[in-house]
Image (cartoon, helix red, strand yellow):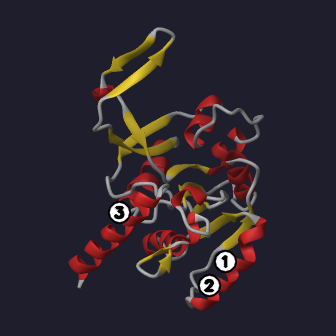
Amino acid sequence: MSASRKKSTIIVAGGKGLRAGGDLPKQFQPIGGIPMLMRTIQAFHRYNSQMKIVVVLPDEFQLLWEELCRLHDFIVPHKIVNGGETRFHSVKNGLVEIDDEEIVGVHDAARPFVGTDLIARCFEAAELHDCGVIPVVEEANSVRLLTENGSRILDRQLLRVIQTPQVFPAVRLKRAYETVFDPAFTDDASVAEKSGVDIFLIKGEESNFKITTPFDLILAETVWQNNIKTTE
C-alpha cells in the first residue's frame, strides 16, 4: 500500500465580513472569548498537527492578526498570504504555497465548528478517489426558482447545501485555478469541475454552518457554550 500523501489546508479569510456586525471583520470576532479564525485553525490542527495550514488574509488586517495572536498566545503554526480581489483570487494566492503532490483542503474561516471526523472523511475520500470531495447537507426549507413568469417550486429532496472543507489532489486543483476568473465560480468545486475534475459528495454536518450575520454569531456562541458543557 502506498504511503498517505501529505495534507494541507487553505483557510480563506480574505473578505471584509462586515455583515456579521461590529467594527471587526467576522473572522476576528470572538466565539467563547477567542477569535473565530483561531478556532477554525485549531480544528484542522486537531485533525493533523503536521498539516500545513495557509491562511489567506487581506493585507490591511495582517498586523491586527499578529497582535491578536500575541494577545491570545496563539502558537498553532500557519502561514499568512495576501487575500485577492475575490475568493477565487484568494484561493489562487494560497495555492502558491501548496506542493503538487499534496492533498489540499479549502475551508471558510467562518466555519469554526467543522468536526475532526468530517475533515478526515473529506481528505480520505479525496485521496482514495483522486477527485474533488465536498461535504453537503440536505435542504430543509421549501424552495422556489425565480422564472420570467414568476416562480416555481423545486423538489428540495434533489437539492444539497454545500459546505467546506472542499478537498482535492493539489495538482488537479492548481491546474483548475489556471483558468480565467468567471463570476459563476462560487466555490472550489465549481472551478475544479470546469476543468474536468469529478466531484464526490459526502455527508456534511449541520453544526458546520457558515457565520455570516449577527444572528449567526449569537447562534455560534450558543453552540460553543453547549460544546463546552458536553466536554466538561
Q: Nearer the viewer, residue 76 or 65?
A: 65
Q: CA distance from mark 2 to mark 3?
A: 24 Å
Under circle 1, the secondary element is helix
How packed is label 2: few (under 14 Cα within 10 Å), some, or many (20 or more)?
A: some
Left or right of 190? Residue 100 is right
Q: Name the element at disc 3.
A: helix
Q: Which mark is residue 219?
A: 3
Residue at (43, 64) in percent of width and height: 217
Locate residue 151: give its quadrant. top left
Q: Compute the Cα span from label 1 to label 2.
A: 6 Å
- Residue 145 % position (x, y): 42, 21
Image position, residue 224 (x, y; %) = 34, 72
Report if the CB atoms under discs 1 and 2 are less than 8 Å apart.
yes
Q: CA distance from mark 1 to mark 3?
A: 24 Å
User: Residue shown at 48%/80% (left/top)?
Assistant: 34
Image quadrant containing the C terminus: bottom left
Q: Which residue is mark 2?
A: 69
